[in-house]
Amino acid sequence: DQQVKQNSPSLSVQEGRISILNCDYTNSMFDYFLWYKKYPAEGPTFLISISSIKDKNEDGRFTVFLNKSAKHLSLHIVPSQPGDSAVYFCAASELSGGGADGLTFGKGTHLIIQP
Amino acid sequence: DSGVTQTPKHLITATGQRVTLRCSPRSGDLSVYWYQQSLDQGLQFLIQYYNGEERAKGNILERFSAQQFPDLHSELNLSSLELGDSALYFCASSVSGGAFGELFFGEGSRLTVL
């Protein structure tokens, strides 16, 4: 049973426009959420995170929104650039529980930025 | 460069065989995590070690085992290999024992079982 779901395997966006990647989770104990970015032949790299006490966190062109009642988070990239083409993984953790169960990852969304 | 080193990068072996994947964490990181990424699957958490001790277990098969040595490097042993074990195996490290922070991933070891 997938506790973190990324329902869009791929997303194509024009350069300069906004990219919105979505993630849903089912475990209400999750209280810390992260986005990782992965290029081919490389390991995932941390992008941005958000704690459940917030509903928004911004870092440059990247903003993560959290809707706890809907158990939904999204990553916005504005403006999208060619270098943003990668696979994006949503991940969740139980911070209050010590997070000792490892991060739970979604299957990823392949973002393709079209010139 | 994340600072996490995994070897080998690629490995091809036959069913029934045993392999060992190695991971050197970032300098100063005490926690090591192993993840498996199969085709069309997300990153599946296998196991975590913190300062030499097993800290958490995920979806790790009984045919798989891991350990973390005093110098903090870790090895993942995969035995009685099956075709379905073909996957990318990632190691990640972090300073703390809790998986709430940023994990630093290696480039992965791609295992192909024929």
Image: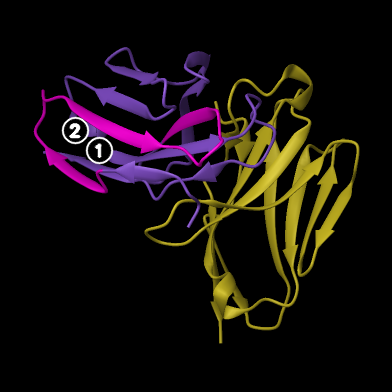
Chain colours: A yellow, B purple
Examine the image and state in which quarter residue A17 appears: bottom right
User: Over which residues does the magenta segment extend?
Assistant: B8-35
**Badge number at residue B83:** 2
Q: Residues within 10 Å of mark 2 (few under 14, many from 20)?
A: few
> Is residue B83 in sight in this rendering?
yes
What is the secondary structure assignment of the residue under circle 1? loop
**Badge number at residue B86:** 1
Pick the quarter of the image with the C terminus of chain A: bottom right
Chain letter of disc 1 in the image: B
What residue is at 37 percent from the left and 36 percent from the top?
A: B23
The extreme bottom residue here reads A115
Do the residues under discs 2 and 1 have CB atoms within 8 angstroms?
Answer: yes
- Amino acid at dot 2: Leu
What residue is at 63 percent from the left and 40 percent from the top?
A: A91
Q: How many marks?
A: 2
Q: CA distance from mark 2 to mark 1?
A: 6 Å
What residue is at 45 percent from the left and 51 percent from the top?
A: A43
Q: Is residue A9 magenta?
A: no
What residue is at 38 percent from the left and 21 percent from the top?
A: B69
Residue A4 image point, x, y percent: 62, 36
Residue A30 image point, x, y percent: 74, 28
